[in-house]
Image (cartoon, rainbow, N blue to C red):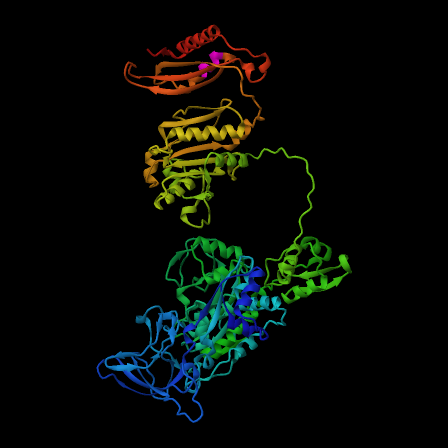
């Protein structure tokens, strides 16, 4: 939102604060001013000049030599003549290529030598053009930064000033104040729709500076525009109201959906003349980023920026059947909007229709079949209140965001509907001629005032931690437009009943009123008090998601925040079934379905990182997967889950980087699970029937705790890498936090370091390739019984003397008295004989179970 400093000062006559002070006060009150820019900065040294004569350039066919009377002014870079000195020559000759140099006697904007024009980054110096010295410049609106025209080719010529505007030599900003302004760029939160119009901002600023302010009437606003002679329409000026004409004689209005459109107002101006707007209106719109189109359209845009109330102008001659009908669209009904797009409407869309079909998408954009054009003579003005939720749904469904929808989605002030309509109608007769029809149509029911909210002094002071007198609080609320229906009681027992105004739909309860009071009073008035520290009993809650996050960070992963919405194409690329839950109004097609896996968001981050030259990636996320469950239909089964992606290289000092592989994923998975559950985690081969389709068939495994599968890990399938354009492989870890939570977390137990020596045996076993290493290790541990402390596989070998279809697995087995870690006083050192007997039993067991033989 952009706000005009000059406009705000017009609405608050007693305000003399600088733009910077206003910005500071607004920001402290919760309306952030992100920047202040200057409109018309290049007009600082310009003056009004009179054209005396012009003639063709002697050597350049497209140029003219223009003689001007610049008058005498200190703004020209010189000083006023001293007593007795000859006055400087007010006439100068300018080389000009504009096609619209006025006849002698016309007024133009003259930039003297030394003037700087920031809009075109030019500082004027004497220039010789075709043998003639040009002593300044006659400027266009583009060169002064007064127009949105971007290029010289679009420039229509120099700025022609109204006749009789001012004497030559008068500073341009003095003759035309509208050419200069300061623009405040506001970062508004969605709960402040009242600040989307200058009247709402003026109310807020007057309250912050404790200045008297009253909402101006439509007549006062029209009179304040200060119309100059020569700026009205060239058409004869008729009476402001047409004798005997009413709006209902020309058009009828019916609302079929009063829930989506409680109120609809229509005004009418007859006999208008379409033309350009006067400079005060054009520059006001241009300074706020709105391009001037015509006097009729510009009036509706002015009302939008002043009241925050969107309006739409129809050519009544194009309203078929002279009927306006507010209704829901029929499915597939076509409408071509003002942006030239042909749209197929939905049954949930609210439209403004005539007797034959839709003419506008309610609250968003008008239709091309009734827009204002050069031959329009009868203008129907629409001023309505549309329910925010309906406008929001329609805007998102059609991918449209307009100045109108931006305001209706947040809630416009329905209490200003009549004033805005009257203001627009009256101002249009001033600028486009014609006469307004009396008795505008106001269809629908007036929205009743809201229920009062009780403000208690005791509660207010308890929330703020300070003492705010209730009369001071009610005075602040009154200045903000709230209605205070008397105060009752005294001291801490005092209270007041306050009715929130129609321009503040965000006010719902007592805490909201307290916030308004402290905003205006100043957050700096609230003292800093340290909270009281009270001892509390220890909490032994098991927050699984926090435990998992902490474990993931401790092993070197970084958390990524991903969307719960993904695209159907990403789900398909992973080889998963279609997502069962699709959004009715997605923000974009890339966010159209609820995720059934956490991987799309993580893999998108990998793709983006690699495109920015980041090769090594270690990220994770925790969130819900949304799966179909017939027992919960139509709701989703939200499965809490964890996922991590590792990509790039494993780097070690003084060693060549090695690309991460399935063993990195295995190590991360086991470490996280064991740190969360304090239980021993195992890995096992993942059967093809349960293996995810996006994992490599020969590089994937599952994670088990107490025999229960809690997750999986593996290398991303090459086909998925290609489909998602990841530019390289990646390894994955996925955990089902619901299963992990059901396994539970064992209480950590302290185990002292054993003081007795261990007996170790390394054994290499030849087994078939179909035998899993994990199964062999489990069998060794079981056969070793209580004396077997640990079993680790440390080598795999194929070839040589190993038969085809077999491999050698080497295990490191540790034997020790189990009491060495629990009861050292009773523990003993194992003898070689008993270790050999137990180890022999281990070898017999693996031979019987897997056909394993000792490697020669």
Give the magenta-colored segment's residue range: 778-784
Which residue, as the protein is rendered here, is positioned at the far right?
Answer: 490
Query: Is residue 136 visible to the viewer in this orientation of the structure?
Result: yes
Query: 579 or 708: which is nearer to us?
Result: 708
Query: 848 or 801: which is nearer to us?
Result: 801
Q: In the picture shown, does residue 758 fall above or below 716? A: above
Residue at 35% across / 44% down in the picture? 613
| Residue 45 falls within the magenta-colored stretch | no
Q: Quadrant of residue 40?
A: bottom left
**Number of numbered labels in the structure image:** 0
Q: In the picture shown, does residue 814 fall above or below 661? A: above
Query: 486 or 444: which is nearer to us?
Result: 486
Where in the figure is residue 662, as x and y percent of width and height? 38, 29
On the rendered image, what quadrant is the C terminus found in? Answer: top left
Query: Is residue 265 visible to the viewer in this orientation of the structure?
Result: no
Q: Is residue 130 left or right of residue 824?
A: left
Q: Quadrant of residue 231?
A: bottom left
Q: In the picture shown, does residue 328 fall above or below 832? A: below
Query: 823 or 710: which is nearer to us?
Result: 823
Q: Quadrant of residue 146?
A: bottom left
Q: In the picture shown, does residue 722 fall above or below 237? A: above
Which residue, as the protein is rendered here, is positioned at the far left?
Answer: 59
Residue at 41% across / 56% down in the picture? 333
Where in the figure is residue 324, as x and y percent of width and height? 48, 66
Residue at 39% across / 69% down in the picture? 148
Secondary structure mostly seen in magenta is: helix
Where in the figure is residue 556, as x and y percent of width and height? 45, 36
Where in the figure is residue 364, as x and y percent of width and height? 46, 61
């Amino acid at each position: 939102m952009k706000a005009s400093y000059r406009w705000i000062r017009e609405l608050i006559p007693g305000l003399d604060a600088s733009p910077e002070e206003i910005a500071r006060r607004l920001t402290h009150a919760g309306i952030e001013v992100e920047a202040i820019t200057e409109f018309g900065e290049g007009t600082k040294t310009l003056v009004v000049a009179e054209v005396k004569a012009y003639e063709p350039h002697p050597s350049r066919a497209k140029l003219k030599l223009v003689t001007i009377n610049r008058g005498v002014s200190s703004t020209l870079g010189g000083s006023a003549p001293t007593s007795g000195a000859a006055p400087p020559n007010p006439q100068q000759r300018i080389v000009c290529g504009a096609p619209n140099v006025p006849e002698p006697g016309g007024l133009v904007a003259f930039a003297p030598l030394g003037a700087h024009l920031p809009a075109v980054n030019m500082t004027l110096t004497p220039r010789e053009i075709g043998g003639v010295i040009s002593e300044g410049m006659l400027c266009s609106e583009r060169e002064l930064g007064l127009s949105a025209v971007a290029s010289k080719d679009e420039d229509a010529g120099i700025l022609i000033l109204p006749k009789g505007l001012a004497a030559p030599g008068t500073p341009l900003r003095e003759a035309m104040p509208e050419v200069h302004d300061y623009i405040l760029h506001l970062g508004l939160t969605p709960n402040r729709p009242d600040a989307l119009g200058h009247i709402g901002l003026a109310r807020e600023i007057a309250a912050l500076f404790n200045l008297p302010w009253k909402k101006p009437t439509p007549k006062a606003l029209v009179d304040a525009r200060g119309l100059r002679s020569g700026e009205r329409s060239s058409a004869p000026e008729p009476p402001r109201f047409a004798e005997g004409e009413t709006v209902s004689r020309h058009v009828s209005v019916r609302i079929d959906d009063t829930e989506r459109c409680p109120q609809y107002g229509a005004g009418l101006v007859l006999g208008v003349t379409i033309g350009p707007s006067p400079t005060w209106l054009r520059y006001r719109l241009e300074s706020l980023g709105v391009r001037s189109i015509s006097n009729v359209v510009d009036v509706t845009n002015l009302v939008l920026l002043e009241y925050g109330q969107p309006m739409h102008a129809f050519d009544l001659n194009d309203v078929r059947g002279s009927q306006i009908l507010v209704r829901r669209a029929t499915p597939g009904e076509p409408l071509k909007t003002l942006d030239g797009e042909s749209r197929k409407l939905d049954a949930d869309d609210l439209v403004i229709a005539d007797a034959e079909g839709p003419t506008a998408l309610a609250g968003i954009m008008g239709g091309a079949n009734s827009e204002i054009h050069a031959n329009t003579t009868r203008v129907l003005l629409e001023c309505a209140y549309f329910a925010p939720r309906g406008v929001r749904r329609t805007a998102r469904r059609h991918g449209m965001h307009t100045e109108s929808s931006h305001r209706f989605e947040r809630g416009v002030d329905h209490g200003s509907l009549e004033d805005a309509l009257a203001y627009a109608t009256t101002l249009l007769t001033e600028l486009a001629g014609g006469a307004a029809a009396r008795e505008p149509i106001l269809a629908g029911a007036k929205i009743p005032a809201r229920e009062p909210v009780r403000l208690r002094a005791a509660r207010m002071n308890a929330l703020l931690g300070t003492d705010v007198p209730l009369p001071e609080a009610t005075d602040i609320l009154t200045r903000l437009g709230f209605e205070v229906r008397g105060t009752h009681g005294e001291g801490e027992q005092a209270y007041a009943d306050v009715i929130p105004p129609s321009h503040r739909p965000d006010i719902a309860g007592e805490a909201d009123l307290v916030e308004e009071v402290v905003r205006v009073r100043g957050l700096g008035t609230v003292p800093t008090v340290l909270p009281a520290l009270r001892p509390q009993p220890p909490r032994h809650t098991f927050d699984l998601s926090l435990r998992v996050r902490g474990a993931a960070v401790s092993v070197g992963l970084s958390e990524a925040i991903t969307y719960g919405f993904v695209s159907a194409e990403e789900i398909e690329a992973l080889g998963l079934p279609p997502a069962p839950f699709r959004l009715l109004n997605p923000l974009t097609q890339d966010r159209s379905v609820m995720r059934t896996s956490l991987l799309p968001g993580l893999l998108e981050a990998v793709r983006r990182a690699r495109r920015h030259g980041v090769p090594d990636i270690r990220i994770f996320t925790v969130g819900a997967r949304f799966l179909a469950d017939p027992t919960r239909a139509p709701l989703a089964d939200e499965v809490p889950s964890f996922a991590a992606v590792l990509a790039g290289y494993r780097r070690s000092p003084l060693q060549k980087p090695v690309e991460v592989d399935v063993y990195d994923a295995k190590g991360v998975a086991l470490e996280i699970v064991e740190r969360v559950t304090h239980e021993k985690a195992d890995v096992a081969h993942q059967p093809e029937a349960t293996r995810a389709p996006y994992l490599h068939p020969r590089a994937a495994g599952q994670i088990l705790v107490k025999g229960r599968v809690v997750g999986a890990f593996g290398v991303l399938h090459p086909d998925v890498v290609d489909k998602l354009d990841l530019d390289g492989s990646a390894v994955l870890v996925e955990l089902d936090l619901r299963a992990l939570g059901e396994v539970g977390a064992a209480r950590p137990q302290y185990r002292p370091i054993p003081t007795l020596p261990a007996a170790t045996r390394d054994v290499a076993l030849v087994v078939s390739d179909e035998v899993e290493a994990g199964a062999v290790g489990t069998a060794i541990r079981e056969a070793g019984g209580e004396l077997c402390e640990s079993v680790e596989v440390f080598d795999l070998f194929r070839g040589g003397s190993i038969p085809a279809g077999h491999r050698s697995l080497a295990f490191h087995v540790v034997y020790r008295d189990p009491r060495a870690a629990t009861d050292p006083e009773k523990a003993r050192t194992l003898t070689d004989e008993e270790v050999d007997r137990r180890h022999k039993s281990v070898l017999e067991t693996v031979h019987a179970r897997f056909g394993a033989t000792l490697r020669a």
